[in-house]
Amino acid sequence: MKWSLPLVMLLAFSLAPAARAADETQYKAAYAAAEAATKEAAGLRNQWTTTVATLAAAKAAGDSGDFDRALSAAREAEALAKASIVQALSEKEAWKAMEIR
């Protein structure tokens, strides 16, 4: 019994999913998605400055080899771009509700 607890703990920790560092492939995929969403937002004339800054930070981190930070920033930039797209599309019709009749 003395050896069974450490053996069980070792087995449990070895089967637990390990936190993995982001690699360049994940970063490039996230960056491409963020860049596409940013271009779509720019096409709607509703590109947020924070999105551009976050995308630039992702590129800088990726260029320096810090793929964890780059992946995080790229995902944040994509989320910001998608939020600006939603805002642009909702405001495209929302102004009609405020029109004086």
Image (cartoon, rainbow, N blue to C red):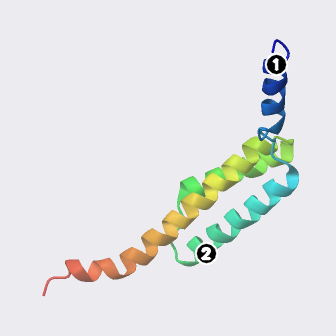
Foreground tag (1 vs 2): 1
* Vertical arrangement, residue 59 with respect to residue 69, above or below: below
* Vertical arrangement, residue 16 with respect to residue 41, above or below: above
- Name the quadrant of the C terminus: bottom left
Q: Position of residue 78 (x, y in %)?
A: 62, 61
Asked which secondary structure carries label 2, the reply is helix
Give the labeled residue for mark 1: 6
Mark before the other along the chain sequence, 1 or 2:
1
* Vertical arrangement, residue 77 with respect to residue 15, above or below: below
Using a 10 Å C-alpha cutoff, classify the residue at mark 2 as few (fewer than 14 neighbours), some (14 to 19) or many (20 or more).
Answer: some
Disc 2 residue type (three-letter): Glu
Tell me, yes or no, if residue 52 can be seen here. Answer: no
Q: Quick one: which residue is furthest to the left in this view? A: 101
**Residue at x-position 29% and y-position 78%:** 95
Q: Quick one: which residue is furthest to the front in this view? A: 1
Q: Position of residue 71 (x, y in %)?
A: 74, 50
Disc 1 residue type (three-letter): Pro
Tell me, yes or no, if residue 33 can be seen here. Answer: yes
- Name the quadrant of the N terminus: top right
* Vertical arrangement, residue 93 with respect to residue 63, above or below: below
Q: Position of residue 87 (x, y in %)?
A: 43, 69
Q: Position of residue 75 (x, y in %)?
A: 66, 55
**Residue at x-position 21% and y-position 77%:** 98
Q: CA distance from mark 1 to mark 2?
A: 54 Å
Rendered image: mark on residue 34: none
Give the labeled residue for mark 2: 40
Choose top left, top right, bottom left or bottom right for residue 99: bottom left
**Residue at x-position 83% and y-position 31%:** 11
Asked which secondary structure carries label 1, the reply is helix
**Residue at x-position 50% and y-position 64%:** 83
* Count of all numbered marks drawn on residues in the image: 2
Q: Does 58 sit left or right of 2 as displayed?
A: left
